[in-house]
Image (cartoon, rainbow, N blue to C red):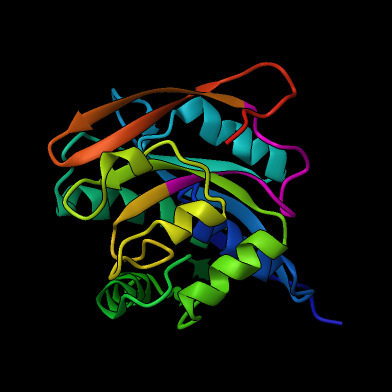
Amino acid sequence: MPAPEPILFCWSGGKDSGMALHALQSQSDVRITALLTTVTEGHERISIHGVRRELLRRQAESLRLPLHEVLIPPQCVNPIYETRMEEALRMHLAQGVRKVAFGDIFLQDLRIYRENNLARLGMEALFPLWKRDTRELISAFHKTGFRAISVCIDGKLLDSSFAGRGLDESFFRDLPMGVDPCGENGEFHTFVFDGPIFHRPIPFTVGETVQRDSFFFCDLLPKEEAQVAPC
């Protein structure tokens, strides 16, 4: 029997990453070698999502996977982002990893961008959730026992009250018409803290919500107790 295919996973810390990782780990012919995540220097948070670095590391510990953090500056311009990502990818390529997985669902431009960047290095992109119906994905999210909380809201598309809400059935019921259930157009971003891929839930407490430009960020604070904050 051939050895499982080594795959590097681009991990955002959110629900789509969680579902995509779960889909891959359900296959016997693949092996996830590490998580790759961009972290904003100085802010010490997952880029775009705004989740504290400590919580990212606790996710990796619970997933029992190595974590490779790619540091990028605030307001990072694309050439710097691409240079630092390439440096990281080449490290994994040198270790025999030629496939990189993402949690993207239907943004074709983003898929082409990722595929082209990887192809230049002789690597291939995988999209385990590609073209899945996002309503069906949310149904599967709940059925398989995932739990997540919204951490970043685009105020141009959603009311700020959605920040800090748990992704229960009422969250999706309250989404306005035209908002994708998975937030694939950037309407909201999440932090996944429990589910079938974790060996234990990630404990946290909900902090304050702050506004930056048109975005609302709910701060999550690491918690030492084993009890997970209710959502």
Camera sees residue 6:
no
Judge by depth and name the residue closer to the eye, 146 or 48: 146
Quarter of the image for the N terminus: give it: bottom right
Please tell me in which quadrant of the rendered image residue 211 appears.
Answer: top left
Q: Residue 35 versus residue 166: which sits nearer the camera?
A: 166
Depicted 54 relative to depicted 46: above or below: above
Of residues 138 and 125, the one drawn nearer to the viewer in this rendering: 138
User: Where does the C terminus fall, quadrant-wise?
Assistant: top right
Return the x and y of residue 162 as percentages of the image width and height. 36, 43
Where is residue 187 drawn, in percent x and y?
Answer: 29, 56
Q: Residue at x 64, y 56 (%)?
A: 33
Q: Main secondary structure of the magenta part?
A: loop
- Measuring 51% from the left and 53% from the top, which residue is drawn there? 170
- Percent coordinates x, y for residue 68 in the rendering: 51, 43
Residue occupying the far top of the picture: 224
Q: Is residue 165 visible?
A: yes
* 202 drawn magenta: yes
Residue at 16%, 51% in the rendered image: 156
Residue 218, above or below 144: above
Residue 202 coordinates in the image, percent (x, y):
65, 33
| Residue at the right extreme of this rendering | 1
| Foreground of the two, 161 or 202 | 161
Residue occupying the point 45% across, 73% down? 123
Magenta residues, start to end: 190-203
